[in-house]
Image: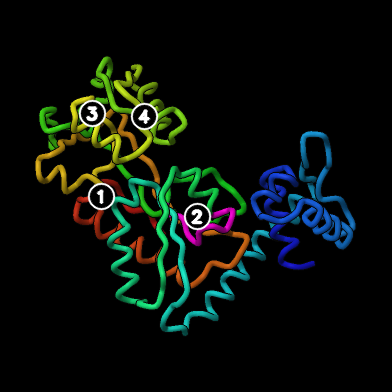
């Protein structure tokens, strides 16, 4: 029994398919099948039921999976303890973020990394939350700064804060951060919305159902920059966090108002892989982001509340 077999077990169980796990891990399917078979032979019982639609984990497989997940976490802790004495990081750290978090964090994180670890190279990438998680699972990034994903055994998630979302409009909309608006006031008001595949849209639609209204899209846009440009051009307000637009609101280029009954929120998390070592550099980035987020929440730039570590 080795670490690679446990890693394979975690991914096959999560995806329910050898072919999908092979695609995620960039390993040939026969090699993964052999690892599962060897693990089953060593344990002496089948870990999966094979059928036409994929692989279904057995009861004993679930027990082994729980232990495998704990073993991978313990190995990661051992590596973290062993690396604590290292003073300066080298190499490359790849950081994935959603577009709104990228607006908030990229420059500050880059400055902190450059100051404290000048020999550490950085690569920042941004995309939808689902893509960030996919990059992390494929090993294309070392850490994900994103919004709360579905529970997955291949991920270790550190909740950071619950972020409040505001109605954001142009200067002519004359919204005020001192005057909260009931969500129901958005009925029949054309909005700039992300497409239905976007996680932010799901939050908006859930709030609309709770307020017993239907949202109307003036136009749909799936990029942060596109949404802001459309709002400023008068296509209607949108719903976003305050932090990435704070400077524009302070300058009067945009206006914003809190929403209530209900208040749209989402949880910001730091995501690490659970099936492979987390580098000390990635841990440093996560800690630096957590410190930065706490400072912005304290200043009222990032509206929300910090979650317990």
Label whose residue precedes the other's in the sequence (2 or 3): 2
Highlighted range, magenta: 136-145
How far is the residue under mark 2 from the one under mark 3?
32 Å
| Residue that mark 1 sits on | 302
How far is the residue under mark 2 from the one under mark 1?
20 Å
| Residue that mark 3 sits on | 237
Please count the marks in the image: 4
| Residue that mark 4 sits on | 204
Mark 1 Cα shell of 10 Å, populated few (<14), some (14-19), many (≥20): many
Q: Confirm or deny contact between disc 2 and disc 1 (CB under 8 A).
A: no
Residue 257 point in image, percent of width and height? 19, 34
Label whose residue precedes the other's in the sequence (4 or 1): 4
Q: Confirm or deny contact between disc 4 and disc 1 (CB under 8 A).
A: no
Q: Does the segment drawn in magenta span residue 301?
A: no
User: What scheme was used to colour the molecule?
Assistant: rainbow
Residue at horizontal 45 percent and vertical 77 percent from the top: 90
Q: Confirm or deny contact between disc 3 and disc 1 (CB under 8 A).
A: no
Looking at the image, residue 278 lies above or below residue 216: below
Label whose residue precedes the other's in the sequence (2 or 1): 2
């Amino acid at each position: 029994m080795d670490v690679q077999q446990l890693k394979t077990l975690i991914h096959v169980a999560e995806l329910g398919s050898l072919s999908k796990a092979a695609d995620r891990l960039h390993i040939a399917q026969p090699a993964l099948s052999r690892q599962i078979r060897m693990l089953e032979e060593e344990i002496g019982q089948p870990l999966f039921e094979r059928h036409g639609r994929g692989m279904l984990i057995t009861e004993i497989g679930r027990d082994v999976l729980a232990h495998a997940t704990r073993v991978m976490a313990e190995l990661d802790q051992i590596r973290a303890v062993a690396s604590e004495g290292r003073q300066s990081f080298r190499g490359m750290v790849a950081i994935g973020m959603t577009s709104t978090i990228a607006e908030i964090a990229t420059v500050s994180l880059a400055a902190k990394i450059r100051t404290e670890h000048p020999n550490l190279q950085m690569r920042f990438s941004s995309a939808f939350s689902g893509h960030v998680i996919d990059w992390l699972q494929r090993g294309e990034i070392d850490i994900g700064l994103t919004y709360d994903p579905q529970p997955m055994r291949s991920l270790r998630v550190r909740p950071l804060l619950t972020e409040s979302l505001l109605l954001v409009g142009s200067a002519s909309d004359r919204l005020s951060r001192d005057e909260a608006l009931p969500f129901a006031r958005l009925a029949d008001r054309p909005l700039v919305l992300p497409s239905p595949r976007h996680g932010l849209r799901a939050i908006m639609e859930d709030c609309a159902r709770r307020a017993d209204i239907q949202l109307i899209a003036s136009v749909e846009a799936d990029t942060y920059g596109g949404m802001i440009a459309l709002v400023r051009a008068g296509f209607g307000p949108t719903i976003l966090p305050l932090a990435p637009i704070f400077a524009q609101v302070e300058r009067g280029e945009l206006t914003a108002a809190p929403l209530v009954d209900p208040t749209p929120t989402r949880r910001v998390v730091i995501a690490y892989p659970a099936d492979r070592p987390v580098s000390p550099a990635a841990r440093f980035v996560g800690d630096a982001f957590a410190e930065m987020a706490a400072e912005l929440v304290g200043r009222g730039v990032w509206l929300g509340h910090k979650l317990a570590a």
